């Protein structure tokens, strides 16, 4: 189980309150209205939930027009303790029957066409089931479900403490720190606007200066409808008026320039000089921005990216590892640093980016530290690892995951075999034979085909035969998996495609000034990909 709570535990705890199936007296209507009765209590994913109405019980109340209503609950109903929703009480939630789920679903509930409050759907296997449980808990035709936003558990933990509970939740604004591009955009534009105001005043905050022309006068909120959703900026004010940030052109609801600048921040925001160029697009070419001000911007970004890199992991049966290299300035020299990346397929069948690290090489010590960090963050239940045959990774994997079956990438094996075939016209027939071995129905058949090929190669390609006898069986671990999973796990191609996309996005930088700047950009790109995978359809059916 990916979480400590089981279905039986949830049911027992949910019915521990006054409305549960037990011997506790049912509260009177006055007691129920006042909340003066015992509640069931559940701890899910580290969140404390008070259950008011267990599944199957009836919830009653009176609407704004004085009309009585009664609803039979299709799921356990309660609220998150120590939270505050738009109605002033705890954020409401429905708890379903599937604690293995790694996603929650946040419903923006409307009443009379206007936003009312949020309802969180927990422990549901998919969005459709969550929607149905919500609808079944109200009168037929209830129009309250305005929109639904999927959220990871880490995002769900972050949101009640940091999100705006008075507004509908937008997917792009739901972030584990800075997972959402909209939040990154908000921070960058706000900071750029403060810088521009200081330039307009000819004085920094609290600075005594003979050149000062006016004084700061707080901020006013401005909500801009962007393709990232609604983003609320803090517009700096001055006492005498006459100032408005050029990044937020007065009256304009177009965000094209801001989105382009944000994209370039991700791609080129790796040195003070380049970040200055990007922010000047927001505040105007005449603005001179110091490295201290840039550091303040990157510090805000780094805080969110660090939260993403250190978020808790969970049961992940399949793990894929790979590395690529970036040119980085280190100790007054330009070196090729290894970007170590791990992706996985979780128990729910979704792909996730598990982690990333920038190291000076792929030596065992760096891979071991990276794998150890994944374990410390909660990675468990690993049943299969796929990677290439790198000595440092191989040693680290054996040390950190002893006994876990290892699949050597079949694509790399196929490619490496060509180096042992001297005649060019023989390479295609050899490749066809190897492909036939890897496409066998099971490990026994693959070994039989390999033995037949070895007899042939010992005569025609003796070096290939000696290499293949030792190396090709390292690509057979995938035969131990369900047949429906083999095609996607017999190579590391999925991760290599991701690395190629990273290369395309980082190519503009050409040379990173330090490892922190490299890690910042790669983390931002991988966080975007992880969010996309998290909300996509399942990658593998884990119950084939």
Image (tube, rainbow, N blue to C red):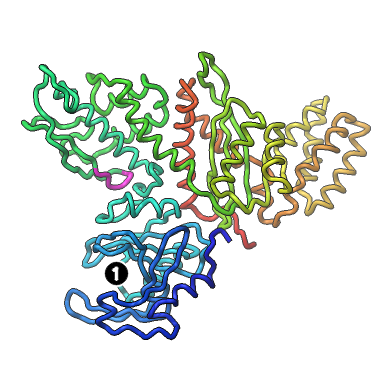
From the viewer's perspective, tell me whether residue 504 is left or right of residue 482.
left
**Observer-nearest of 197 and 22:** 22
Q: Quadrant of residue 122?
A: bottom left
Quadrant showing the N terminus: bottom right
73 magenta-colored: no
Residue 239 x/y as whole percent? 8, 32
Count how many numbered circles sit on residues in the image.
Answer: 1
Residue at image location 22% in from the left, 31% down from the top: 193
| Most distant residue in the top direction | 332
Quarter of the image where one finds residue 244: top left
Magenta part, dominant SS: strand
Q: Is residue 477 above or below residue 143?
A: above
Residue at coordinates 29% horizontally, 36% vertically from top-left?
256
Task: Report x, y in % for residue 376.
Answer: 56, 45
Quadrant of the drawing holding the C terminus? bottom right
Magenta-tinted stretch: 227-232
| Front in this rendered view, residue 210 or 480 | 210
For mark 1, give the secondary structure. loop
Vertical placement of 318 versus 391: above or below?
below
Pick the residue in front: 210 or 497.
210
Instruction: Identify the residue at horizontal 52%, vertical 30% (top origin).
Output: 503
Q: Is residue 184 left or right of residue 126?
A: left
Q: Residue at x 63, y 54 (%)?
A: 381
Label 1 belongs to which residue? 143
Residue 437 lies, in percent from the top left, at 80, 45
Q: Is residue 301 above or below residue 209?
A: below
């Amino acid at each position: 189980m990916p979480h400590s709570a089981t279905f039986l535990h949830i049911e027992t705890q949910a019915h521990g309150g006054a409305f549960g199936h037990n011997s506790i007296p049912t509260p009177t209507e006055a007691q129920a209205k006042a909340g003066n009765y015992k509640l069931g209590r559940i701890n899910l994913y580290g969140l404390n939930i008070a259950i008011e109405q267990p599944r199957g019980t009836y919830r009653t109340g009176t609407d704004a027009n004085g009309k009585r209503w009664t609803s039979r609950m299709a799921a356990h109903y309660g609220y998150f303790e120590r939270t505050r929703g738009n109605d002033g009480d705890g954020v409401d939630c429905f708890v379903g029957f599937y604690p293995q789920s790694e996603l929650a679903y946040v419903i923006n509930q409307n009443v009379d066409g206007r936003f009312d409050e949020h309802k969180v759907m927990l422990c549901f296997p998919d969005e459709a089931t969550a929607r149905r449980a919500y609808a079944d808990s109200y009168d037929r035709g209830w129009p309250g479900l305005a929109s639904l936003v999927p959220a990871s558990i880490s995002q769900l933990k972050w949101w009640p403490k940091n999100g705006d509970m008075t507004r509908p939740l937008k997917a792009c604004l739901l972030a584990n720190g800075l997972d959402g591009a909209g939040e990154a955009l908000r921070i960058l534009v706000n900071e750029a606007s403060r810088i521009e105001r200081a330039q307009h005043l000819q004085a920094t905050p609290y600075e005594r200066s003979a050149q000062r022309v006016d004084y700061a006068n707080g901020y006013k909120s401005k909500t801009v409808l962007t393709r990232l959703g609604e983003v609320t900026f803090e517009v700096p004010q001055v006492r005498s008026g006459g100032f408005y940030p050029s990044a937020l052109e007065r009256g304009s609801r177009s965000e094209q320039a801001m989105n382009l600048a944000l994209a370039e921040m991700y791609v080129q925001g790796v040195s003070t000089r380049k970040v200055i160029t990007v922010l000047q697009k927001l505040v105007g070419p005449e603005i001179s921005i110091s490295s201290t001000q840039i550091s303040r911007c990157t510090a805000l970004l780094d805080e969110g990216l660090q939260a993403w890199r250190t978020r808790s992991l969970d049961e992940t049966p399949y793990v894929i590892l790979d590395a690529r290299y970036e040119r980085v300035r280190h100790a007054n020299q330009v070196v090729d640093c290894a970007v170590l990346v791990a992706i996985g397929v979780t128990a729910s069948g979704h792909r996730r980016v598990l982690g990333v690290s920038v190291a000076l090489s792929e030596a065992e010590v760096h891979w071991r530290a990276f794998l150890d960090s994944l374990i410390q963050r909660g990675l468990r239940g690993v049943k299969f690892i796929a990677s290439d045959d790198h000595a440092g990774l191989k040693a680290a994997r054996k040390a950190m995951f002893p006994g876990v079956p290892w699949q050597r990438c079949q694509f790399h094996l196929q490619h490496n075999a060509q180096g042992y075939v001297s005649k060019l016209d023989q390479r295609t027939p050899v490749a066809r034979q190897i492909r036939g071995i890897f496409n066998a129905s099971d490990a026994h058949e693959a070994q039989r085909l390999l033995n037949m090929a070895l007899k042939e190669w010992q005569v025609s390609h003796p070096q290939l035969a000696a290499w293949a006898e030792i190396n090709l069986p390292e690509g057979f671990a995938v035969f131990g998996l369900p047949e429906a999973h083999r095609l996607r796990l017999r190579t590391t191609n999925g991760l290599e495609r991701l690395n190629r996309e990273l290369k395309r996005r980082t190519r503009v930088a050409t040379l990173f000034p330090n490892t922190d700047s490299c890690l910042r950009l790669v983390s931002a790109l991988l966080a975007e990909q992880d969010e996309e995978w998290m909300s996509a359809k399942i990658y593998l059916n884990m119950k084939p």
